Every structure is written in C-alpha cells, then in structure tokens.
Amino acid sequence: MELTHEEVERYIDQISSGSKILDIGDEVVLFKFPSRYDLMRARRLYDKEYNDSIEEGLLSVDKMKELMKDRNLLTPEDRRKLLSAKSKLEAQKVLLAKTVKVKANQDRIKGIIHKLEDEIRIIEIKERSKFSMTAETKAEEYKILYLCWSSAYNFMTEELLWSEFDLFLNEYRLVFRQNVISEFILFYGGIP
C-alpha cells in the first residue's frame, strides 16, 4: 500500500496527538484517546454492568459454555467439522505458498480456501451468536459506549458532543450516534 506524503503526515499526527478529526453526517467530530481516568471509570462501569447483568439473569461466558455443552448447541459433529476445516485450510495455505508457477492451480486452491473459510465462519457464527447474550458482552458494550461518549468532541469548540452520558445513551439521532460509535471503535482499535 503506497501512501502519499500527506497521508503519512496525517497518520503521524493522529498517532502522536492521540486524536482524529472526521466528518460524521453534518458534524465534524474530534476523537481524543480516553484519559487514564476515563479508562479507570470505564472499567468500574464494566464491573457494575457485569454484576447487574448477572443479577438480572444473564449468564457469564463460562456458564454459557457449560450450557452450550450440556444442551449440545454446538454438536460433536460441528466441532469435528470445524477442526477438520481448519486443518484443511492450513494445508491449502501451505500448498498455495508452494504453488507459484501455474496460475490455474493457484486460482483453484484460492477457491478451496474461500470455501473452507466460509465453512469455518458458519460454524463459528453459530457458536459466537450465543455469546452475544452474556453478561460480559453487555458489560463490554456499556464500557465502549462510555468510552465513546467521553472521547467524542465537537471539533470547533472542543466540548463533548453530548454534555452528559445519559444524553448520549438517549440520542434521538440514532444513525448519527451509531456512526459515531462505529468510527470510535475503529479509532480506539487503532484502525486508520
């Protein structure tokens, strides 16, 4: 991937400042990397949300794993298929790396790799979908919402986009809020 001088400079500025400026809808948003205090507070909110979720009856990840095993939600056949597909995938990747002369063979192997990746994805989605209903997931989502709120500023005024966390949670412009969250997740994860 070739970057222009300006793009390199922009990425260096983002990394060194811990911030990013972007257009979201009609607004120019400034993200600032969360302060140590915000990170501590987010961990505290995570713990509270986790405990509240357990009290409300949501299962922890460990309990969900037990339940899935007890109820055979991911069957031994699914597990066998998953292991087999992963093994075959690795073998095909090795074969692809060694097949450098014949383009037709490379294309055939790439097709097999895509098919195996799809098989793996289907089984993993079946398993992961259950984990979206755990106390950890709910707590992690709440933590991310808090960090997003505390990191999103109006570019011109450098004031928080929402003066209070509750205003952010109850934002009526749902598409705008979701776009802010999505962009924050990319920013927080270090993805340009």
Image (tube, rainbow, N blue to C red):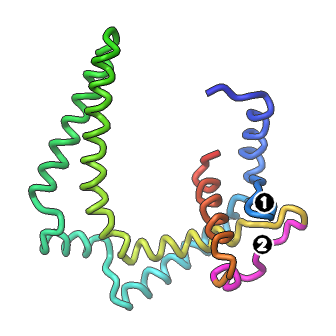
Q: Residues within 10 Å of mark 1 (few under 14, many from 20)?
A: many
Which quadrant of the view contains residue 154? bottom right
Residue found at x 90% / y 63%:
156
Residue found at x 12% / y 50%:
80
161 relative position to 47: left or right: right
Secondary structure, mark 2, is loop
Q: Tell me: residue 105, above or below residue 20.
A: above
Label 2 near label 1: C-beta < 8 Å? no
In the rendered structure, which segment of residues is drawn in magenta? 157-169
The residue indicated by pointer 1 is 30
Screen quadrant of the C terminus: top right
Residue 159 covered by magenta stretch: yes
- Out of 189 and 16, give the one closest to the viewer: 189
Distance of label 1 from label 2 (alpha carbons)? 9 Å
- Out of 110 and 94, give the one closest to the viewer: 110
The residue indicated by pointer 2 is 161
Three-letter amino acid code of the residue under disc 1:
Leu
Residue at the left extreme of this rendering: 76
Q: Tell me: residue 176, above or below residue 80.
A: below
